[in-house]
DNA sequence: TGAATATACTAGGACATCCAACGGTTTGGC
DNA sequence: GCCAAACCGTTGGATGTCCTAGTATATTCA
């Protein structure tokens, strides 16, 4: 990372776009690039907070999802859909979480194709503790003003709906 | 990626946060999660557009950066700083771009420690063509309204400055 | 019943990122 | 000048993600 730059590289890129014949898409380019960089910064903070718990963000998301599941268990396919990741990524994450004793696989009672995943006691405990860490170390001071938080939720919500994430 | 969900999973997560004792950080959690998901969607679009050119986003960024360099070349360290990635990632990207004949390494004339990277003719051509593709396939219809684009640039700019990306 | 569909696992590959450690180079205090 | 410290790029190893394809099994529907 190193020291801060003296100029905003994204603002520079926008200027380059404007001066090289693409003024009409310069602003959207800058916005999209800013989303990329922001995600990178946030992910680094989250991963740093989760590291002491032996979790990555992907695995934490699965843990958190399970901790909120009504019945305490979830089909893998459902987890894949809710977290918007490839089924093999779920398999991969469950493999590691299971090896760590945090979740367990069990057969679906009526549908022999699907396997259910549920938290172990240790998994439930770790979900609670790691969530507390994220709340206090990341979410409590996100780097956005409260008004900007609301704006982001609205703008990105519109975007995600528009992109086909959900129909609501 | 499958059919749209009937409910917004991030809104559900926010409700879960509010109902499980963390109402004060529920909104920032939702905003940050939305940034994550938005980045994922945008990155997928960008990668799909770049794939026919044999480029990834990381490699495209380096190509674009070089195409705007005043002198046509850039020290690796400088590229690392401007793109906000670790030096080893630049080495990795340059290795692949060099193998593809798109950039070339050359020694710095006065400082023997640093190596310069510059575009080849083919690299410059590909940078131009892939930028045109991104402009027409992604940036021209980003999924944000023009007003939201401005909002995003402002909000995320504040965030990045606050995070120490640049001092401006 | 038979054909199409759905779920999950496996294996393999392509990438990006981070870390620690290493040579070669330059810089700056003495 | 000299030598220690700092700097630059690279290497090798480890993690982790995503994707494609193929397989096995189970379910659904014509």
Image (tube, coloured by chain):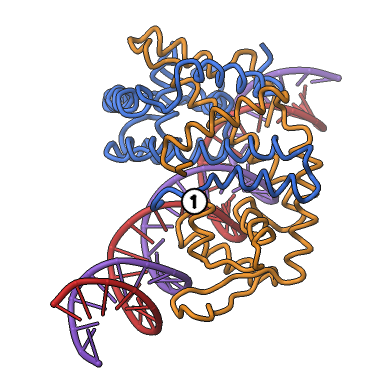
Chain colours: A blue, B orange, C red, D purple
User: A76 and C13: which one is in front?
Assistant: C13
Q: Residue at x 59, y 36 (%)?
A: B40
Expressed as whole percent of the image width and height from the top left, the position of residue A20 reads 77, 51
Q: Is residue B49 left or right of residue A84?
A: right
Does residue B68 appear in the picture of this structure? yes
Q: Would residue A113 be seen by someone viewing this image from the given angle?
A: no
| Residue found 69% across the figure and 56% down from its top | B55
Apparent side of residue A111 relative to residue B19 in the rendered image (left or right): right
Q: Is residue A156 above or below residue D17?
A: above
Residue A50 figure quarter: top left
Q: Residue B92: x percent and y percent?
A: 53, 64
Q: Quadrant of residue A106?
A: top left
Q: Which residue is mark 1?
A: B84
Picture residue at 41% right of the left edge, 41% below the top: B164
Q: Residues within 10 Å of mark 1 (few under 14, many from 20)?
A: some
Residue at 45% in and 80% down: B112
Residue A29, position as x, y percentages in the image: 68, 40
Q: Secondary structure at mark 1?
A: loop
- Quadrant for residue B125, please give it: bottom right
Q: If the image is split into quadrants, where does the C terminus of chain A sit?
A: top right
Residue A21: horizontal and vertical position, in percent? 81, 48
Instruction: Give above or below for A156 relative to B104.
Output: above
Q: Residue furthest top?
A: B19
Chain for numbered disc 1: B
| Count of marks, rendered view | 1
Query: In terms of depth relative to the viewer, which is nearer, A53 or B71?
Result: B71
Q: Is residue A165 above or below residue B7?
A: below
């Amino acid at each position: 990372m190193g020291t801060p730059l003296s100029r905003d590289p994204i603002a520079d890129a926008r200027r380059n776009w404007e001066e090289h014949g693409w003024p009409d898409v310069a602003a959207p380019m800058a916005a999209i690039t800013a989303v990329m960089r922001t995600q990178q910064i946030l992910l680094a903070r989250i991963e740093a907070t989760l590291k002491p718990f032996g979790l990555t963000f992907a695995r934490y998301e699965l843990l958190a999802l399970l901790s909120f599941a009504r019945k305490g268990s979830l089909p893998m396919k459902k987890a894949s859909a809710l977290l918007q990741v490839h089924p093999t990524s779920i398999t991969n994450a469950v493999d590691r979480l299971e090896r760590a004793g945090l979740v367990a696989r069990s057969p679906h009672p009526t549908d022999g194709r699907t396997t259910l995943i549920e938290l172990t006691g240790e998994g439930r405990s770790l979900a609670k503790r790691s969530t507390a860490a994220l709340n206090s170390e990341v979410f409590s001071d996100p780097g956005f003003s409260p008004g900007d938080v609301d704006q982001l939720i609205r703008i990105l919500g519109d975007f995600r709906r528009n992109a086909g994430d959900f129909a609501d």
